[in-house]
């Protein structure tokens, strides 16, 4: 094997693919990245796989001798990232799995393993590919991924639920304390066969989000799925992951149909106030109180952290309905507001003990439900 490519290109590709390499692999070869150099297409393909998540990436290179082997992900990546930003040469002799990296910085040898024992990525061949707009997919991921659970005992909640129906693609995530639902209009989803109703691990979708951000958004993303796997194809990059098993909660029934109170406020002003008051709230379980004042057309944010201090800020707002004191985990509020991209945000609620819903006032259709915290004393 022998190929020449820019250091910056190889370093970026290794950084992406290594995210699918386990830090505690079940066998030595899975600590490595599979390298395939193809002389006909003048390209190199890298593969990382932890037996659940797989990332495959192809890039152009000057291939002089074809070949396939595996190299240790961390060691190889660390060396390449520190080389000078110029062309580097990677070559191995015959069937040897030892690779020599050459650049003006110097010469390094890295011992790899044979590719024979490297597992193949799962293939998803059944059914037609669903074509999704990269922009719709990215908006859905940004608006919902933050609300997934990190508790592995509630495995289905560690994933994002994808549902396609009519002309909408719906993303839903909940950790039991909050729920984010994003609806994006995508004509491709209307003709999707088969219709999607699956739960995809959040870890895999965070990697997909990174991949899409560096992708030509004019091109659609092809999605294929079967009963156990889903494949996202971005052309030069592909991501495959195992679907999560189990029934996802019926989240739509959690959303209230009517609200007695409504508050409209500037999103950035509210975020800034919450970030300041969160400094004190962090001393008291991250809990803050919001007071709705319809007479003054304002809301007040306050925190009482015994033995440390207290804080209070008032913000102008459009308030309809009776006055109310309601408390939340400030981190949950900030997570949602950061996912919105509008000037104004609306909070809708009924009582201090019932769910509150936050929505951005704009084109993006996000419904973010947060359970309040009981105010004691």
Image: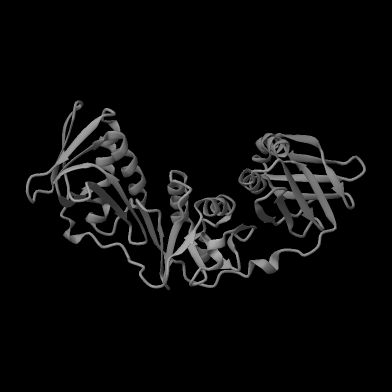
* Residue in the picture at 82% in, 57% down: 351
Quarter of the image for residue 223 reads bottom left
Extreme-left residue of the structure:
94
Q: Is residue 290 left or right of residue 199?
A: right
Quarter of the image for residue 374 reads bottom right
Extreme-top residue of the structure:
104
Q: Is residue 285 left or right of residue 7?
A: right
Quarter of the image for residue 238 reads bottom left
Query: What is the total number of numbered labels drawn onto the structure image?
Result: 0
Residue sitting nearer the eye, 341 or 49: 341
Compared to 301, does 51 lie above or below?
below
Compared to 33, does 243 lie above or below?
below
Q: Position of residue 23 (x, y in %)?
A: 33, 50
Q: Position of residue 27 (x, y in %)?
A: 24, 58
Residue sitting nearer the eye, 88 or 356: 88
* Residue in the picture at 48% in, 72% down: 194
Tell me if I can see residue 161 in this picture.
Answer: no
Q: Position of residue 167 (x, y in %)?
A: 60, 65
Q: Is residue 49 left or right of residue 293?
A: left
Residue sitting nearer the eye, 114 or 170: 170
């Amino acid at each position: 094997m022998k190929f020449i490519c820019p250091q910056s290109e190889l370093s970026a590709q290794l950084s992406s693919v290594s995210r699918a390499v386990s830090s505690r692999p079940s066998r030595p070869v899975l600590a490595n990245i599979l390298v395939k150099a193809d002389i006909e297409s003048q390209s190199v393909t890298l593969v990382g796989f932890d037996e659940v998540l797989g990332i495959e990436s192809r890039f152009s290179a000057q291939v002089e001798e074809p070949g396939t082997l595996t190299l240790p992900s961390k060691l190889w990546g660390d060396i390449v990232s520190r080389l000078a930003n110029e062309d580097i040469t990677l070559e191995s002799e015959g069937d040897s799995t030892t690779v020599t990296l050459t650049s003006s910085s110097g010469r390094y040898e890295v011992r790899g393993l044979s590719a024979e024992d490297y597992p193949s990525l799962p293939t998803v061949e059944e059914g037609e590919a669903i074509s999704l707009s990269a922009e719709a997919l990215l908006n859905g991921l940004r608006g919902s991924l933050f609300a997934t659970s990190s508790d592995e005992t509630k495995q289905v909640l560690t994933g994002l639920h994808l549902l396609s129906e009519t002309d909408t693609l719906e993303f839903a995530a909940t950790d039991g304390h909050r729920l984010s639902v994003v609806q994006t209009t995508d004509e491709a989803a209307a003709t999707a066969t088969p219709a999607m109703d699956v739960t995809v691990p959040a870890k895999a979708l965070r990697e997909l989000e990174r991949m899409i951000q560096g992708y030509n958004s004019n091109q659609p993303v092809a999605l294929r799925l079967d009963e156990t796997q889903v494949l996202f194809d971005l052309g030069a990059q592909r991501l495959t992951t195992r679907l999560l098993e189990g029934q996802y909660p019926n989240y739509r029934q959690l959303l209230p149909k009517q609200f007695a109170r409504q508050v409209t406020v500037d999103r950035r002003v509210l975020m800034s106030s919450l970030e300041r008051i969160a400094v004190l709230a962090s001393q008291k379980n991250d809990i803050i109180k919001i007071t709705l004042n319809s007479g003054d057309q304002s809301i007040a944010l306050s925190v009482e952290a015994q033995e440390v201090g207290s804080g209070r800020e008032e913000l102008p707002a459009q308030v309809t309905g009776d006055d109310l004191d309601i408390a939340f985990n400030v981190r949950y509020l900030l997570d949602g507001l950061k996912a919105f991209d509008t000037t104004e945000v609306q909070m809708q609620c009924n009582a201090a003990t019932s769910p509150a819903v936050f929505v951005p006032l704009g084109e993006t259709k996000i419904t973010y439900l947060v359970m309040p915290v009981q105010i004691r004393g």
